Amino acid sequence: MRQIRSTHRRSCRRHASSTSAAGGGASGVALIAVLWLLALLTLLASAVAALSVTHRQVFERYAESVQAESIDDSAIRVVLLRLFAGRRSGTAWLIAQPQAHALLDSSVDVMVTRELGRVDLNAAAPEILMAFFAANGWTESDAQAMADRIVLCRQTDASRVPDAPFHAVTELKQLPGGAGITPELLDAFTVYSQAPVPLPTAAPGAVRKALLWADRHQSGGHRWLTDEPQIGAESLAAEPAALIGEVLRVQACLRGSAAVQCRVATVRLTGNINKPLQVFEWKTDVGTKAPANEMTF
């Protein structure tokens, strides 16, 4: 009898021990599952918080960009209004020089330039086209090849669009080799002046280099400049009345804005009080600021 009881007690202890071990294993698995769940929830919460911060930053940048754009546009309209109103006052206006304008508790740099000083893709003399690229870092062979492509494009499209084969300067990038044209060089072109030769006193730096290059090499067998003018501040001033009928480019850049962008309007002053402006283009120019004056040879 004692042997039977002893055997029964040992059997009970083994059962209890195995039951305890099984229970402990299940508790361990449950604990690990809970820890993994907590970790996953923490990661999800962190991701949601980071996403919220990103969305807020994107929205803030967008709101600032819209505000800067609105202020720049207002500054352009104010300058155009002053130009139109000043056509009878005789007050000279500084050309190609950034001027600060206070607007809505902000300061905006506004610069007016004349399209007559740029190289017209539809009208520029082939010698000027070649000189432009040669004077701005291209080899003479590459410069001549690009000039030939532009002229060929004008001739090819003449039957389809006789007055303006190029509608925008960005179309120049579509020609073979055009991808290598930098934004600075592209800014020196226009499709609005209809001038075979850019006006030297209104030319930006890249165009002045081209005129000097063509003149010194006597491209086409003749001189392109009667002299080499030293352009001073007084030469940069123009009376608004003298600008009537011209195409102007007005660039406005908000000072202190984190949004690195400007607004650019290309317009013609008509002199008509009922319709004072003919607007060709009004756009955002990302990544630029109004350049400093460099109008000297």
Image: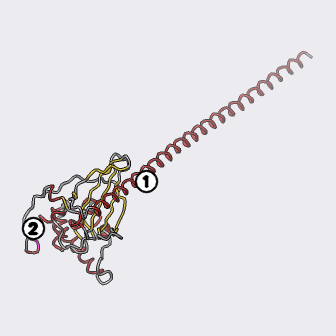
**Among all residues in the image, which is located at the extreme right?**
1
Q: Give the amino acid at mark 1.
A: Val
Picture quarter with the N terminus: top right
24 relative position to 240: left or right: right
Residue drawn at point x = 52 percent, y = 45 percent: 51
Image coords of residue 241 (percent x, y): 23, 66
Image coords of residue 75 (percent x, y): 34, 55
Q: Give the amino acid at mark 2.
A: Leu
Residue drawn at point x = 33 percent, y = 57 percent: 78
Q: CA distance from mark 2 to mark 1?
A: 45 Å
Q: How is the image coloured?
A: secondary structure
Residue at mark 1: 66
Label 2 sits on a secondary structure element that is: loop
Residue 146 occupies quadrant: bottom left
Q: How many marks?
A: 2
Viewer-closest of 60 and 137: 60
Image coords of residue 20 (percent x, y): 76, 26
Viewer-closest of 245 and 25: 245
Image coords of residue 17 (percent x, y): 77, 24
Above or below 154: residue 14: above
Residue 218 within the magenta-colored segment of the rendering: yes
Secondary structure of the magenta portion, mostly?
helix
Q: Which mark is residue 225?
A: 2
Magenta range is 214-219
Q: Are marks 2 and 1 in contact (CB under 8 Å)?
A: no
Residue drawn at point x = 36 percent, y = 63 percent: 282
